[in-house]
Image (spheres, helix red, strand yellow):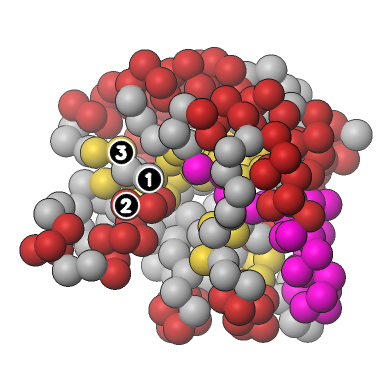
Amino acid sequence: MKRLLGFCFIFALLLGFSLENEVGARGYGWGYKKGQGGEIPEIGSYNPLLQEYGAYFADQSGGKYIYLTFDNGYEEGYTPQILDVLKKENVPATFFVTGHYVETAPELVKRMVDEGHIIGNHSYHHPDFSILTKEAMQKELEDLAEKVGEVSDQKDLKYLRPPRGIFSEQTLEWANELGYIHIFWSLAFKDWETSNQKGWRYAYEEVMEQIHPGAIVLLHTVSKDNAEALAALITDLKEEGYQFKSLDDLVLRDHIPEVIYGY
């Protein structure tokens, strides 16, 4: 089961894919061209789609903000360590969970919410949304939200990360109609292969080499490297002047004038 779930996390993001990685007649795999020298990656013709449907892949305000997001398909034993670091450093995060994760690690989902983090919807069964009907997509999202509400105090989920990064204009539209905001990412690397971990320094350097103002960072909690690198990453990025914000901060700031919001 773990191997199957791990395979599902081979996102179409993988560094080196074209900007518009077509995965089927109806869907696209999220991808981008890495920025140079701390610049935000280029996403080409995806940009007008994201703007039209209020989706995010980065904070483009220019501020030195970072948004940590984690994808949780199954638990490998490292999430408690990650949560310990986030709590110690007073850093918020969003955890995009699947039904399998909530079923098998309900105490960790509860802890995430109790400690002030956001739970995002990664679907119940991790399907390709672009080949589903609207009704099937809605059920995937509603079943996951209901399950999260059963084990934690977060009853409403508003952020969506599509399984495998696959999306279409139709799924963006449906997500909006169902009350969700798509959250993609601007920084990620191949971190989910549990049998091919390369040491904490590898994860640390991957993030530091790609970091840029406004980064939405995608990490997987199954990675031992990520768990062991997280404290050093947070400390060093803070020293470089970065502030860690939640997705709520990003969305709120985007809808309220800066002079009122205050950052």
Residue bearing the label numbered 2: 249
Q: Give the number of the disc on residue 244.
A: 3
Please give the name of the residue rendered at 48% of the width and 16% of the height, measured from the top-left corner. Answer: 84
Residue 76 placement: quadrant: top right
Residue 34 in sight here: no
Q: What is the x, y in percent for residue 171?
A: 67, 76
Q: Are marks 1 and 2 in contact (CB under 8 Å)?
A: yes
Along the viewing direction, whichever of 24 and 86 lies nearer the viewer:
86
Q: Residues within 10 Å of mark 3 (few under 14, many from 20)?
A: many
Q: What is the x, y in percent for residue 2?
A: 84, 32
Left or right: residue 111 versus residue 41 is right
Q: Give the number of the disc on residue 246.
A: 1
Q: Residues within 10 Å of mark 1 (few under 14, many from 20)?
A: many
Left or right: residue 175 versus residue 206 is right
N-terminal label among 3 and 2: 3
Residue 149 placement: quadrant: top right
What is the secondary structure assignment of the residue under circle 1? loop
Please give the name of the residue rendered at 53% of the width and 34% of the height, measured from the top-left corner. Answer: 113
Please give the name of the residue rendered at 36% of the width and 30% of the height, measured from the top-left corner. Answer: 91
Q: Which residues are magenta?
A: 118-142
Q: Are marks 3 and 2 in contact (CB under 8 Å)?
A: no
| Identity, as a three-letter code, of the amino acid under mark 3 | Phe
Q: Nearer the viewer, mark 3 or mark 1?
A: 1
Q: Is residue 174 above or below residue 206?
A: below
Left or right: residue 256 versus residue 217 is left
What is the secondary structure assignment of the residue under circle 2? helix
Residue 150 in sight here: yes
| Identity, as a three-letter code, of the amino acid under mark 2 | Asp
Q: What is the x, y in percent for residue 189?
A: 54, 42
Please give the name of the residue rendered at 57% of the width and 75% of the height, measured from the top-left corner. Answer: 176
Q: Is residue 137 above or below residue 244?
A: below
Q: CA distance from mark 1 to mark 2?
A: 5 Å
